[in-house]
Image (cartoon, helix red, strand yellow):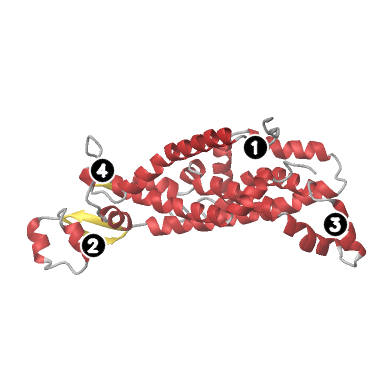
C-alpha cells in the first residue's frame, strides 16, 4: 500500500509537535522575567534581596503599600504614642518602625502615562490612516520621495534630536506638559503608522469604493463605511505598536518632564526605600505598568493576528 502523499504547504504531525515544543519552550523562557517581577511585588524587602533568591516565600502587600504611600522612620516612643494602627497598611508599615506621611506621586505619574500614551496613539493612528489613504488612492506629486522622507524620520534614533527638541519646547512653553509629550510621541509614531497602514489600504480593492460611489456614496462616505471596516485589523496592529512605544518611552520623558507631565517609566526607577531601592515597590510598579498594554493587546488580539498576516496569502 502506498503512503499517503504529504502536501507541500501542510506540516507533518512530527513537525507540528516539534514546532509546538519550541514555541512553548520559548514562551516559558520569555515569561520567566515577568513572573519573577510579579512575584517580587509580593515579597518583603528582605526576601526580595535574599541570596539565594527565594522562590517560596510568605506573600506580603508591603511593596504595593510602599508604592502608593510615602513613609518616614520614627522612634519607638513616637510610634507607641500614636496608639493602635487604624488600618492594615498602617500596621504593616509600623512593623518597620515607620509611619505613613501621605500618598506617593505614582498614581499621578500613572495617569500621565495613560493620557499621553493613549492620546498620542489615537492621534498617530488617526492622522496615519488619513495620510495612508491619500498616498494609496490619489496621485500625489513626488509620492515616492515623500514616503521615503517619512520613512527616513524613523531611521534616526529619536534621542539624537533630544537637545534641539528640549530647546524648542522651552521656547514654546511645551516643556513638562501633556500636550507637548502627546505632540512629540505622535510625531515619532506617525511615520510608522503611515507606512503600516498604507500597506493595508493597498490590499483593499478599489472596486469596493467605486461600487459605493456608483450607489450614491460620496468619497468620504465610501471611506468611512467601506474602507475603514476592512482596515480594522491594520488599525489595531498599528495602534498596538504605537502604544508600546509611547507607553515605554523613557529618554524623552526623563528629559522633557520633571513634575506635571512626568510619566511612570522615569518615576519607577527612583522609588527609594530605607537603605536603598525598595525592590518590592519597584516590582509592584512595573507589574501595574504592564497591565494596560497587556489588556489592550488581549482585547485586540484577534485583529492583531489578522493584521500581521493581512495580505500574506493572495488568492
Give the labeled residue for mark 3. Answer: 208
Position of residue 228 measured from the top left corner of the image (x, y, whole percent): 74, 58
Q: Distance between the residues labelled 2 and 1?
A: 47 Å
Q: Distance between the residues labelled 1 and 3?
A: 33 Å
Instruction: Give the mark nearest the N terminus, 2 or 1.
Output: 2
Give the labeled residue for mark 1. Answer: 154
Q: How far apart are marks 4 and 2 (CA)?
A: 19 Å
Q: Which of marks 4 and 3 is in front?
A: 3
Position of residue 151 measured from the top left corner of the image (x, y, whole percent): 70, 37
Q: Residue furthest left?
A: 77
Q: In front: 99, or 133?
A: 133
Q: Which residue lies furthest to the right in this view?
A: 214
Instruction: Give the mark nearest the N terminus, 4 or 2.
Output: 4
Instruction: Give the mark nearest the N terminus, 3 or 2.
Output: 2
Label 4 residue SS? helix
In this rendering, is residue 296 above or below 26? below
Q: Does any portion of residue 28 appear in the rendered image?
A: yes
Label 1 residue SS? helix
Q: Which residue is drawn at 71% across and 47% down?
A: 197
Residue 89: which disc?
2
Q: Which residue is drawn at 68% across and 50% down?
A: 234
Amino acid at each position: 500500500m502506498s503512503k499517503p502523499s504529504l502536501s507541500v504547504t501542510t506540516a507533518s504531525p512530527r513537525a507540528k509537535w516539534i514546532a509546538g515544543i519550541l514555541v512553548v519552550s520559548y514562551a516559558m523562557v520569555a515569561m520567566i522575567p515577568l513572573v519573577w517581577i510579579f512575584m517580587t511585588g509580593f515579597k518583603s524587602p528582605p526576601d526580595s534581596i535574599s541570596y539565594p533568591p527565594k522562590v517560596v516565600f510568605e506573600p506580603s502587600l508591603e511593596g504595593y503599600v510602599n508604592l502608593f504611600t510615602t513613609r518616614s522612620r520614627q522612634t519607638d516612643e513616637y510610634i507607641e504614642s500614636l496608639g493602635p494602627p487604624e488600618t492594615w497598611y498602617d500596621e504593616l508599615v509600623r512593623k518597620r518602625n515607620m509611619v505613613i506621611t501621605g500618598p506617593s506621586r505614582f498614581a499621578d505619574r500613572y495617569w500621565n502615562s495613560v493620557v499621553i500614551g493613549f492620546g498620542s496613539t489615537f492621534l498617530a493612528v488617526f492622522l496615519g490612516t488619513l495620510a495612508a489613504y491619500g498616498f494609496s488612492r490619489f496621485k500625489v506629486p513626488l509620492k515616492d520621495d515623500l514616503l521615503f522622507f517619512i520613512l527616513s524620520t524613523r531611521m534616526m534614533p529619536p534621542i539624537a534630536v533630544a537637545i534641539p527638541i528640549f530647546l524648542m519646547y522651552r521656547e514654546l512653553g511645551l516643556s513638562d506638559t501633556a500636550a507637548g509629550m502627546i505632540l512629540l510621541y505622535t510625531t515619532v509614531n506617525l511615520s510608522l503608522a503611515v507606512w503600516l497602514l498604507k500597506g493595508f489600504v493597498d490590499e483593499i480593492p478599489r472596486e469596493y469604493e467605486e461600487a459605493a460611489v456608483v450607489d450614491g456614496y460620496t468619497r468620504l462616505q465610501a471611506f468611512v463605511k467601506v474602507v475603514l471596516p476592512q482596515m480594522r485589523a491594520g488599525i489595531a496592529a498599528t495602534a498596538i505598536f504605537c502604544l508600546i512605544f509611547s507607553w515605554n518611552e523613557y529618554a524623552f520623558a526623563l528629559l522633557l518632564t520633571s513634575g506635571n507631565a512626568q510619566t511612570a517609566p522615569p518615576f519607577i526607577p527612583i522609588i527609594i526605600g530605607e537603605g536603598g531601592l525598595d525592590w518590592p515597590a519597584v516590582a509592584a510598579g512595573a507589574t501595574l505598568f504592564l497591565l494596560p498594554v497587556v489588556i489592550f493587546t488581549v482585547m485586540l488580539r484577534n485583529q492583531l493576528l489578522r493584521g500581521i498576516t493581512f495580505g500574506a496569502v493572495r488568492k
